Amino acid sequence: MSSLLANIDLKTKLAGTNRMELLLFRLDSKQLYAINVFKVQEVLHCPPLTRIPHSHRVVRGIVTLRGHTFPVIDLGLAMGRRAVGEPQDQTLVVTEYNRSVQGFLVGNMDRIVNMNWEQIMPPPSGLSNNAYLTAVTEIDDELVQVIDVEKVLSEVMPRNESISDELLSSIDTDSHAELHVLVVDDSSVARRQLEGALTRLGIGCTLAMNGRRALQQLQAWAEEAGPLHERLLMVISDVEMPEMDGYSLTRAIRSDPRLENLYVLLHTSMSGEFNKTMVAGVGADAFIPKFQPDSLAEAILQRIEDVRHSSVA
């Protein structure tokens, strides 16, 4: 199993090139599923688990690996399917999302594939809100479903999604009525979280589910009268998205004279210093990790203050 991830450190070379790597696996059927290798720390045969009374029904137990203790989630159960089987017979995928480590119990591991984000498509329209996928693709004539892990985690380990009352009490939200933000994220959960935070700040927003659609929206707005950066407060974009990722979107914005002055905030569940390097490399203005409501609000408020200060000057 270790050989499967032997080259995982090379993943950073893909960032900014609109390429990515998918870890493919199956649950309890022939259907292939995938998650982005960027989020994977380790893949191994599941070690013995410790059961925790009164834990969520999809949490099969906890495990301690390399000095860290974290929950193990049965991904089949979490997605409304059958349990993947007895843990000792399954594969454990250790991941990090939003500065949190968790393990996912899956069935048969398949392989890692290197792909262009243009090969990853949004899910078919008409899916219910209960669908646990952010994208689909085809590999060797087989459909692959890319799992919306953020949706899974929001249901199993929900976090506070509200801006604190203390912070809101210091804000004149009525003065934000004319402000507008473009939100770009392939996860329905993340889009809902961002829209909710902006609404509480009194700011309007337009939602786009990937970088390609966001760029098309920006180009359409740029055809209207007046510099776009004076009409749009900022772009808040995820990094990992089908068709065009956030890094490539930022580069496209900076290369278009009509868009180059837009403020771009990357909002990502990928952790680490690596993101700070990539922000500078692609020309984004800042990045913050998902999903920290007060940190997000503070970043937006700082942008508002800077804009108003520059207009006065």
Image (cartoon, rainbow, N blue to C red):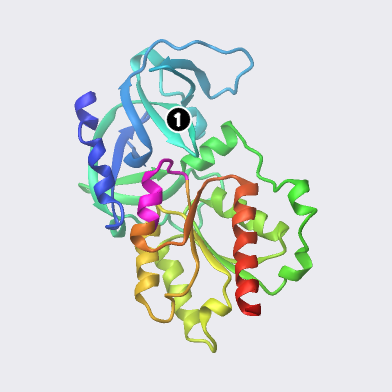
Identify the residue position indicated by label 1 in the image: 75
Percent position of residue 89, x then y: 34, 15
Residue drawn at (31%, 26%), measured in percent from left and top? 43
Q: Which residue is found at the position 49% from the left and 36% from the top? A: 99
- From the viewer's perspective, tell me whether residue 302 is left or right of residue 270: right
284 or 222, nearer to the observer: 284
Nearest the camera: 159 or 165?
Answer: 165
Q: Is residue 65 above or below residue 172?
A: above
Res. 305 visible in picture: yes
At a point 33% along the width and 27% down the height, the residue shown is 42
Residue 130: which quarter of the image?
top right
Question: Residue 19: horizontal and vertical position, in percent?
Answer: 27, 53
Q: Residue furthest right?
A: 169
- Residue 275 vertical position relative to residue 156 in the rendered view, above or below: below
Q: Quadrant of the C terminus?
A: bottom right
* Residue interval drawn in magenta: 269-279
In the image, residue 69 lies in the stretch drawn in magenta: no
Q: Is residue 244 visible?
A: no
User: Type of residue at label 1?
Assistant: Leu
Tell me the quarter of the picture where residue 191 sits.
Answer: bottom right
